[in-house]
Amino acid sequence: MLQLKELTKKFGNRTVVDHINISVGRGELYAFLGPNGAGKTTTIRMIAGLLKPDDGSIVINGFDSIKDSIRVKQSFGYIPDQPFIYDKLTPREFLRFIGGLYGIDPSECDQRAGYWMDQFELSHYFDELIGSFSHGMRQKVVFTAGFLHNPPVLIVDEPMVGLDPRGAVILKKLLRQRCEAGLAAFVSTHSLDVAEQIADRIGIMYQGQLLAEGTMTELQDLTQQGGKRLESIFLELTQARDVGDIPTGAYL
Amino acid sequence: MRFLNTIRSLRLMIINDFLRLNNHYRANGISAVFATTAIILLATFFILVEYFVAEHLFQHIMNQVHLEGLRYVLLAKLLQMVFLIFSVLLVYSNIIMSISSYFLSPEIDLLHTHPISDKVLFIYSFFETFIRSSWMFIAFGLPILLAYGVVLNQAGTFVSQIGLIVIPMLILPAALGVFAGVLLIYVFSPRRTQRVFLIMGICLAVGLVLVFRLMRPEQLVDPIGVEQVNFYLDTLRIPSISWLPTTWASEGFSAYGEGRGTANLYNAQKLWVAAGFSLLLAYISFKIFWWRARSRGQDSDIIELDKNDKKREATPANHFRCSLMYRDMILFRRDAGQWSQIIVIAALVIIYIFNFKNLPYELYGFQYGMSFVSVFASGLILSALLARFGFPAVSMEGRAIWILKTSPINWRRYLWHKYLFLVIPALTIGSILVLFSVRVLDGSSILVLKCLLTEAAIAVSCTGLAIGIGARRPRFNLNDAAMVTVSAPGLWYMILAVLTICVTVGLVVLPDLLRYMSYGWRWLTFIRHADRIVVWFIVLLLVSCATLIPMESGIRHLKRMAEK
């Protein structure tokens, strides 16, 4: 459903994303990990059509993102890490607006919006102004907007930011359910626990390159850390300094 | 010492804007320097024009030797007008700025979470309010006062008057603005800021209309024409209440101009005492109310929906354009900032209509000419309106632009939707202004039709220019999208809009002008019967170019932006 081929992006002389190849199949949840500045958000922004790749291609649902951008955009839902939405609209108005952009019938749109708002336990806030919402509530509204047109592919940048523990559990459950129903989800996250719990496959990016990818077992085999948790694998792959070496008490 | 260290740190925050500007130059290179130079040149031009007009007016009054002592009275009245107008604007501007500096600014959050005393917070925010509001007077008020000093041969000591009179005259509205701003936010729940802004907009609108009409500036056109001097002075009716600081300021300046040192110092003294007292008042209101008002003001940009709004279940059509229209209308309706500005604009339109009605037409010539002057003036009003509401139309998507960028939308339809959303109000406002003006002049039906068609051509072209050029350089990271107009593309829009208005009016008037002139010069007879259709065809061509070229350019840019 989602294929990145030799995807490359440079900012000036710096190669931020360096010829990466990723493929996410139908019903698969792919967790995209990496330390700060690894190139995760740049990759996500290229997939979502917010940045143009310097090289390589992105194919979503069989359509090329450059040649057929409108169909590609019909095929995915995008949830950014910063949910900037209209403060002066209510979720009902916002979701109707989003529905209009995708050509969804208003009554159908209201039904779908109602369903997802209910899933996220936000039904009571359907007619309140978004401006009064917390970060987590906005994130849930954006998720609802992302699911509204039943996209076959979902692209998510940091899904758990701002969500309360209950919201996080609900989201993980919903993501899994949708993937079992055929959704291909590409999720960038810093939360190794989340990746470990819900991902079918995990990709680890470092300095613009895809260091490793595979299922949890495959990654354990790769690093010869059988039975170890993702955290150890991640630290080993990204060559992080042993946290025990970090000096403490210099100014204390 | 601790206080001084804190103030030293705050310096960095105050110069933050300048550092940001510096980074902007570094990032945008020569084009940013060019844009700034163009804006500075244009502003300098306006300031110089203002200075020379003021000097000419003051000189004209001083040359009326037969008026003797009355000349000084007239000059004092003029100064009173200047101080009164600027004071009304300064108080309004300071209230808005104080709400922004004391309640909405992100810096205030940062400062408030650090061990900084209330006094420092007050001084920092006051300074910010003062600078952001007072530059207008410094730029546009000082040239008038300087012209006054030059005419009265007192320019050499003019600097002393800045310290004596101008500075307290600026501190006073700033302190009153802070006082009123803090109280307003305290009294009205910040959730109702929308209403506060509306009330203030209405107050300013009413205030401006009153100030303009009370002063009757048209009477200054021909002072000698009025037979009775007492009657003349009475007709000026400028409020000169002795306890008004504007009166002290104008009397102080008059005394300075006439070389009456004691009176000058006495009025300056009164101003400084008033400024000090108002500062104290502002600080006391800050100490008592700010923290309580602020506690309620954490989400002051949020408005409450009324019950009807919540129940409203109007279902929009699922058409893309309707969807955008639906969103734009709701956002516009709920944006307090837009409404308060509309009220101010409405007040200016009323002033325009009122003054047009009161102009001494016999001084300016024939009905035909005045009708097209009104078309030209209405065109300028429209272009200014479009600079405020049309030019930032795309930038107003703000940080939520990602929604459109990641949606399957057609950018051509998007931009034309924006065009349609604005061209209808532009046509309506333009038609009302022209209809009113030409009707006042008792113009014939043909003249009315001609003026209406010309105004329609201007409205259609200027909307295209505003939306198209605005779409070429949108800025989505501004807190106030309207600020995008203050840029090089904004300047280009204004230049092109004024040019389009001049050329359109010129083209329509040309055949009649040639006809008129051909009565005197026989060699022009061959074009006497030039077909007007040709002229209207050229106007149509101009309208098409002024609309389609910027719109197409804007669409191309949006497509590129979406694909980059």
Image (cartoon, coloured by chain):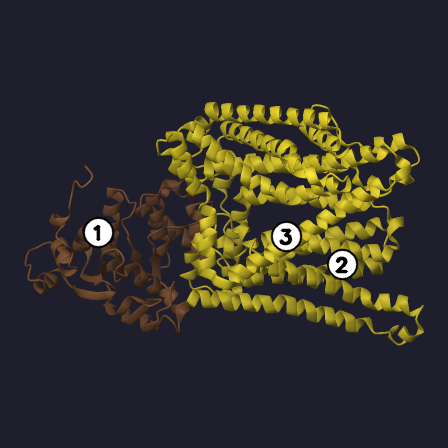
Chain colours: A brown, B yellow
The reply to whether residue A182 is in sight is yes
Residue at the image point whose x is 87% and y is 39% from the top = B223
Tell me the crowding category of disc 1: few under 14, some 14 to 19, or many 20 or more residues within 10 angstroms, Cα based: some
Q: Which chain's residue wears label 2?
A: B
Disc 3 to disc 1, C-alpha distance: 54 Å
Amino acid type, residue under disc 2 in the picture: Leu
Mark number displayed over residue B43: 3
Amino acid type, residue under disc 1 in the picture: Ser
Whether residue A32 sits left or right of residue A97 in the image: it is: left
Disc 2 to disc 3, C-alpha distance: 32 Å
Whether residue B124 sits left or right of residue A52 in the image: it is: right
Residue B268 appears at what percent x and percent y? 66, 28
Depth check, front residue: A97 or B217? B217
Q: Which mark's residue is nearer the viewer, 1 or 2?
A: 1
Q: Which mark's residue is nearer the viewer, 3 or 1?
A: 3
Q: Which chain's residue wears label 1?
A: A
Residue B117 appears at what percent x and percent y? 40, 28
Tag 3 and tag 1 share a subunit: no
Residue linked to disc 2: B452
Quadrant housing the N terminus of chain B: top left
Residue linked to disc 1: A191
